[in-house]
Amino acid sequence: MKIDFIRDELEEEIKKTVEVDEGTSIDEFLDSKNIEKQEVLVSKNGTIISGRHELEDGDEIKVMDVIAGG
């Protein structure tokens, strides 16, 4: 199945359509892209979600870096 994947890395935003297996969770998807789960927020179709959610055909996934400071 296909999803739209948006990677927002603060300096630039990259959008592409990617193939994923049916039943793939957000956490599994992030692992496949070597993205540290603790360092990002993920939205699915505009709603912030947890890593347990499964991807569905046609979803738009946006992965945003989290900024921490002190």
Image (tube, helix red, strand yellow):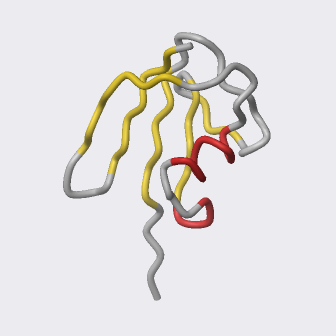
Count of number-bearing discs: 0
Image location (x, y in percent) of residue 35: 50, 57
Q: Residue at x 43, y 68 (%)?
A: 67
| 24 with respect to 17 (left or right) | right
Image quarter hosting the N terminus: top right
Observer-nearest of 16 and 22: 22
The residue most toward the right is 52
Q: Residue at x 42, y 31 (%)?
A: 5
**Would you place residue 32 above or below residue 10 in this image?**
above
The residue most toward the bottom is 70
Q: Quadrant of residue 11?
A: bottom left
Image location (x, y in percent) of residue 37: 61, 59
Q: Residue at x 48, y 49 (%)?
A: 33
Q: Residue at x 79, y 41 (%)?
A: 52
| 26 with respect to 11 (left or right) | right
Image location (x, y in percent) of residue 14: 26, 39
| 10 with respect to 68 (left or right) | left
Observer-nearest of 17 and 45: 17
Q: Quadrant of residue 20?
A: top right
The residue most toward the left is 11
Image location (x, y in percent) of residue 61: 50, 31
